[in-house]
Amino acid sequence: MLIPCIDLQGGQAVQLVHGKKRELAVADVFGQLAAFKEYEWLHIIDLDAATGRGSNAALARELCRTARDEYNMRVRIGGGIRSVARAVSIAAWKPEQIIVGSAAFKDGKIATTFLRALTAKIAPTKIVIALDTARGQITIHGWQKVLKLAAEEVMPQLEPYCGAFLCTDVDREGTMTGANLAWFRKLRHATKHPIIAAGGIKSRREIAALQRLGMEAAVGMAMYKHRLR
C-alpha cells in the first residue's frame, strides 16, 4: 500500500533530502492534500516541531480534520510528540494513529517510563513508533542526534508499546535512489508488528516488493515530483 506524506515546515508542505536540504516546497498545502484524497492513508509530520524550531500545530490539526472528515482518509500524525500531555492533545484531533519517535528514547536507551505512561493514556494500537535510521543507527530529534542503537535490536522491546513501526532510511530519504530492500527484509525478520517503510522509494515495483514483505510504503519525493513509475 502506498501512503502519501505531507511534511510541514514553515506552513508549507516540503520535501527534504536526507532530512536537511529542502528540495521543494508547496505553499498550497490543502491543494496538495486534495491531490492525495484518493488514497486510504495519509501521513502528516510537523518537521518544525520535530526539530524544536517551531510548530505547525494549527495547520496540522486542520489537515487532519479535512483528510478525515472530507476525504475519508485514515491519518497518522507525528512530529515533536515528546510528552504524554502532547500525545493526548494530538490524539484528541482523532487521527487513526499518532507517531512517536524521539521520546521513545532517553539517554541512549529505550524510555520505558515514558512509554508505560503513554500507553496508560493511549492504547498501543493507536501508537506508531518511528525508527529513523542513518548508517545503521537510530537517529532522533529531527535526525540531528544519532544513537548507538539499531532498529532491529530494539524492535522486540518496543512491541508492547505500539501497534506498528515507521522505519525511515535516512540515508536515502528524498533521493529517489530506490528502497533499501535488504535493510527492510532485516527489519521484517526482527518483528511481527506492521512496518511502514520510507526512504528513497521511487517505483511501484518497489512498493509491490515491500507489500510482499508485509509492509506499507510511505512515499514523498517521487509523488511530489510525479516520478513514481
Image: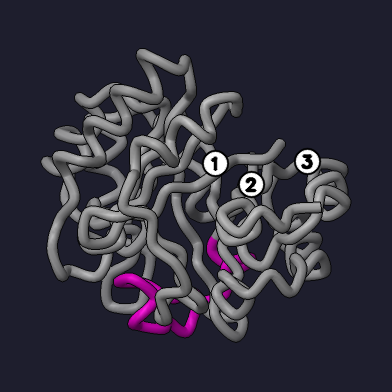
The residue that appears at 81% across and 52% down in the rendered structure is 229
Q: Are marks 3 and 2 in contact (CB under 8 Å)?
A: yes
Q: Is 143 covered by the magenta stretch? A: yes
Residue indicated by mark 1: 164
Q: Are marks 2 and 1 in contact (CB under 8 Å)?
A: yes
The residue that appears at 49% across and 47% down in the rendered structure is 5
Separation of disc 2 and disc 1 at Cα?
6 Å
Q: Position of residue 189 (x, y in %)?
A: 77, 56
Amino acid bearing label 2: Ile
Q: Position of residue 145 (x, y in %)?
A: 35, 82
In this view of the protein, which residue sits in the foreground, 64 or 155?
64
Q: Position of residue 67 (x, y in %)?
A: 39, 25
10 Å crowding of disc 3: few (<14), some (14-19), many (20+): some
Above or below, 184 relative to 209? below
Amino acid bearing label 1: Ala
In this view of the protein, which residue sits in the foreground, 129 or 71?
71
Q: Secondary structure at mark 2?
A: strand
Q: Position of residue 79 (x, y in %)?
A: 30, 54
10 Å crowding of disc 1: few (<14), some (14-19), many (20+): many
The residue that appears at 23% across and 30% down in the rendered structure is 62
Q: Is 109 covered by the magenta stretch? A: no
Residue indicated by mark 3: 214
Magenta part of the chain: 138-154
